[in-house]
Structures are given as structure tokens and as C-alpha cells.
Image (cartoon, rainbow, N blue to C red):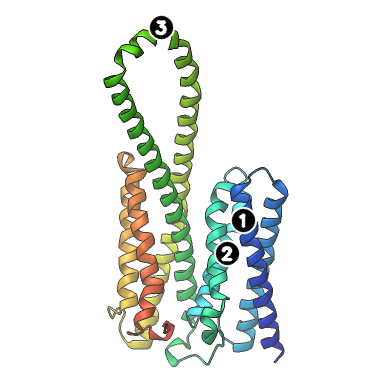
């Protein structure tokens, strides 16, 4: 009774804090000058992280197993992983705001969805099925979820890179079209005003080149951190798949059964292996590798969330019904 009450209290505190944090995050996106709001946002993230940590610990002590036995607990652990990545970013002062713009919304919305009323029926844990009563539960599922969290964060950085690159290319296309139209209809006027506008052109070229330089530097940072975070997530995913194969051999007598969850996890591994291979080629870095990461982002959600909608296979204990 005490543990159940404590769990409800921590759930309500974390959900209330997340509601406030979402509001603060939206305000900081619109108004960058308010430093106090950003500090309040970070404090709210820390409070929510501590509440989720307490929630996971409470369920662990009360149910006497690591809280990763169903979709609700895995979602809570996924949001906890996002918060953990966000906390680690405090050590990187220069890139903290760039990376927290990705990790903060991911943690907030995942935890908000998990603690909302949509998964009320799954909030109550139960006795583990025989297949899950193993020490491999902590090793396999925690590595997989940590891998998903890191891969999602890295993929979102790549998506941001694609958006900025696409916006840059779109602007350049419109500029070229504008120049063509101007040259077609107002060639004589431009030739007449050419001498008078030389000074203005020189003055306007400098700010434009500076903007392009900072945009290029920002894209390079996004590509760099996307590669680093995805590499970390790929390691977690590899360890999770290997430990899952060993566990499957102990539980079901076979290392690999081509279960839907296993198949999509393998597809996810292949996609990000392709990303890491492409990223080693200097000519294919940037937008090309980011496209592969974006495909991987979609595949992760199919593997993690979409397969659970089917409710079939050896991993059906993690499914739910709409």
C-alpha cells in the first residue's frame, strides 16, 4: 500500500512538472532572451528526472524485478534514458543548448505520454511470465531501450540537419529564380544602376557570407554530434541484440526465431550500420548520411511501438490494444 501510494505521488508530481516544463520549453523557443526561464526549464528537467528515477526504483523494490516487463515500464525507462542523456550534456557547455533542444522535447513528450491516461490499464505491474524471469531481463531490455534513446536523439539531430540544408537549398533556388527574372525584365535598369549599387553589394555580401559561415558551422556540429550519439546508440543496440540472442537460447532453445520484434530490431541494426559505413566516406557526410539516419528514426518507432500493435510473436507480452 505504501509503495503504491508513493508510486502514484511520484507519477502525479512528474506529470505536473512535465506540464510546466512543456510550457517553459515552448516559451524559451519563442523568446531566447529570457535566461531565467531557461534555468527554470533545466531545474524542472532535474526534478522530473529524480521523480522518474524514484518511480522506477519504487516499482523495482515493490515488484521485485527490474521495471521493464511491459510497454508502460519501457516507456518510462525510455523517457528516463532521454533525461539521462540530457543530464550528461551539462558537461558540454558549448553544445549544451544545441543538443538539449533535441533531448528535452523527446524526454518531455515520451514521459508525458507514458504517465497520461492513455496507458492506465498498463500502469499496474504484474507477476512476470516465465520467459521474463531471468537475470538477462535487465541486461537485454535496458541495453535495447538505451540504444533506442541514443539512436532517436542522434537521428533527430540528423533530421534537424536535413531541415536546415533543405531550407538553405530552397532559399538559393528562389534567389537564382529571382535573379533570372530580374535579368530578363530589368537588364537595362540593372546595367544603368550597376555603378551606383557596387558599394551596397559589397556591404551586403559580408553579412551574407557571415551567415553562410555560421550556418555551415552549425551543420558541421549537428553532423558531428549526430554521428557520436548514433555510434553510442549502435553499441547499446548491438549489446542488446547479442544478449537477447543468448537469453532466447536459454528460454526458447534457439538463438534466433525471426520473431517480428527480432526482425525489426535486426533491420534497425542494418540501417544504422549502413549510416556508420556511409559516414566514413568524406563525400557522403552531411545530408546523405542524415537521410539514412532519418530512415532509421522511422524504423525504430516501427520496431519499438508499431510491432506492439500487432500483439503477435514471442514478444507479445509487450503489446497493448487500442
What is the quadrant of residue 103 in the picture? bottom right
Disc 2 or 1, which lies upstream in sequence?
1
Label 1 to label 3: alpha-carbon separation: 49 Å
- Mark 2 surroundings: few (<14), some (14-19) or many (≥20) residues within 10 A: many
In this picture, residue 209 sits left or right of residue 18: left
The residue located at (34%, 87%) in the rendering is: 252
The residue located at (59%, 58%) in the rendering is: 86
The residue located at (61%, 83%) in the rendering is: 59
Can residue 150 be spotted in the picture? Answer: yes
Quarter of the picture holding the N terminus: bottom right
Q: Residue 25 shows which numbered tag? A: 1
Q: Nearer the viewer, residue 138 or 310?
A: 310
Of circles 1 and 3, the one toward us is: 3
Quarter of the picture holding the C terminus: bottom left
Q: Position of residue 320 (x, y in %)?
A: 43, 83
Disc 1 or 3, which lies upstream in sequence?
1
Q: Residue 108 shows which numbered tag? A: 2
SS assignment at label 3: helix
- Mark 3 surroundings: few (<14), some (14-19) or many (≥20) residues within 10 A: few
Q: Position of residue 317 (x, y in %)?
A: 42, 86
Q: Nearer the viewer, residue 271 or 207?
A: 207
The residue located at (52%, 81%) in the rendering is: 119
Can residue 96 be spotted in the picture? Answer: no
Q: Residue 51 shows which numbered tag? A: none
Marks 2 and 1: CB-CB under 8 Å?
A: yes
Of circles 2 and 1, the one toward us is: 1
Q: Residue 195 shows which numbered tag? A: 3
SS assignment at label 2: helix
Label 2 to label 3: alpha-carbon separation: 56 Å
In this picture, residue 2 sits left or right of residue 15: right
Q: Position of residue 7 (x, y in %)?
A: 66, 82
In this picture, residue 150 sits left or right of residue 261: right
Amino acid at each position: 500500500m505504501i509503495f503504491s501510494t508513493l508510486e502514484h505521488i511520484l507519477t502525479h508530481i512528474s506529470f505536473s512538472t512535465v506540464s510546466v516544463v512543456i510550457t517553459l520549453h515552448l516559451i524559451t523557443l519563442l523568446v531566447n532572451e529570457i535566461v531565467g526561464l531557461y534555468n527554470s526549464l533545466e531545474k524542472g528537467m532535474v526534478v522530473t528526472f529524480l521523480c522518474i528515477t524514484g518511480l522506477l526504483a519504487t516499482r523495482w523494490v515493490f515488484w521485485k524485478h527490474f521495471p521493464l516487463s511491459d510497454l508502460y515500464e519501457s516507456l518510462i525507462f525510455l523517457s528516463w534514458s532521454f533525461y539521462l542523456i540530457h543530464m550528461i550534456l551539462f558537461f558540454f557547455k558549448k553544445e549544451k543548448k544545441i543538443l538539449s533542444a533535441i533531448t528535452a522535447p523527446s524526454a518531455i513528450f515520451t514521459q508525458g505520454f507514458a504517465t497520461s491516461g492513455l496507458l492506465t490499464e498498463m500502469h499496474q505491474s504484474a507477476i512476470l511470465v516465465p520467459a521474463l524471469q531471468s537475470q538477462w531481463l535487465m541486461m537485454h531490455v535496458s541495453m535495447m531501450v538505451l540504444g533506442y534513446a541514443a539512436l532517436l536523439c542522434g537521428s533527430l539531430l540528423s533530421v534537424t540537419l536535413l531541415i536546415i540544408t533543405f531550407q538553405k537549398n530552397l532559399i538559393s533556388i528562389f534567389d537564382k529564380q529571382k535573379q533570372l527574372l530580374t535579368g530578363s525584365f530589368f537588364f537595362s535598369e540593372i546595367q544603368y544602376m550597376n555603378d551606383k549599387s557596387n558599394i551596397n553589394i559589397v556591404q551586403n555580401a559580408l553579412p551574407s557570407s557571415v551567415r553562410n559561415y555560421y550556418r555551415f558551422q552549425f551543420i558541421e556540429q549537428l553532423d558531428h554530434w549526430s554521428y557520436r550519439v548514433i555510434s553510442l546508440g549502435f553499441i547499446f543496440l548491438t549489446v542488446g541484440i547479442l544478449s537477447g540472442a543468448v537469453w532466447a537460447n536459454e528460454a526458447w532453445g534457439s538463438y534466433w526465431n525471426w520473431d517480428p520484434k527480432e526482425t525489426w530490431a535486426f533491420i534497425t541494426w542494418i540501417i544504422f550500420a549502413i549510416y556508420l559505413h556511409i559516414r566514413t566516406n568524406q563525400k557522403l557526410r552531411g545530408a546523405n548520411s542524415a537521410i539514412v539516419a532519418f530512415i532509421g528514426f522511422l524504423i525504430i518507432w516501427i520496431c519499438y511501438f508499431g510491432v506492439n500493435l500487432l500483439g503477435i510473436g514471442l514478444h507479445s507480452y509487450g503489446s497493448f490494444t487500442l
